[in-house]
Amino acid sequence: MTARRTGSGKAGGVTAAAVRSAALSLPDTSEKLAWGQPTFRVAGKIFASLGDDDTAMGVKCPKEDRAELIAAEPEKFFLKEGHDDHYAWLRVRLAALEGADELAAILADAWRQVAPRRLLAAHPELAGPGKG
């Protein structure tokens, strides 16, 4: 395991360690290496991962929301060409994040995309905007 995989990689004000901490703070979340990268899972389903160089993370995101997010903030959100096109996945540049609150909100939204109903019901504080 390299230094950057232990979370010492820093991008702007948000570090890989901050991503790891925020992701693992969500209910029933675990970390597992896949494809040489840390992935964060709830009930065995991936909702986030750190990129190769810890400057970006990938998050679960409905395909229908991606274009709007990228158009609104292209410096923050992007797709990995040839890969994300086919999946409900979005990349986030860590340096562009405004801080821990925005990081937590993005990760919570990704978590909600894959969390089982029993966890969603047990954690109404994680309900999306206008829910719960």
Image: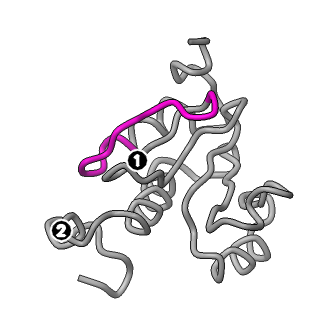
Kind of residue sitting beneath label 2: Arg
Image height of 128 relative to 99, above or below: below
Outermost residue toward the bottom in this view = 130
Q: Earlier in the sequence, mark 2 or mark 1?
A: 1
Task: Specify whether 95 is left or right of 44.
Answer: right
Contact, mark 2 vs mark 1 (Cβ under 8 Å): no
Residue in view at x 75 percent, y 78 percent: 67
Disc 2 secondary structure class: helix
The colour scheme is: one colour
Classify mark 1: residues with Cα within 10 Å, few (<14), some (14-19) or many (20+). many
Does the magenta-highlighted stretch encompass residue 129? no
Q: Quadrant of residue 8?
A: top right
Query: In this picture, which residue range is highlighted in magenta?
Result: 23-36
Image height of 86 relative to 98, above or below: below
Cα separation between marks 2 and 1: 15 Å
Q: Quadrant of the C terminus?
A: bottom left
Q: Which residue is mark 2?
A: 118
Task: Specify whether 104 is left or right of 50.
Answer: left
In terms of depth relative to the viewer, which is nearer, 43 or 128? 43
Classify mark 2: residues with Cα within 10 Å, few (<14), some (14-19) or many (20+). few
Residue in view at x 66 percent, y 65 percent: 87
Q: Which mark is residue 41?
A: 1
Kind of residue sitting beneath label 1: Arg
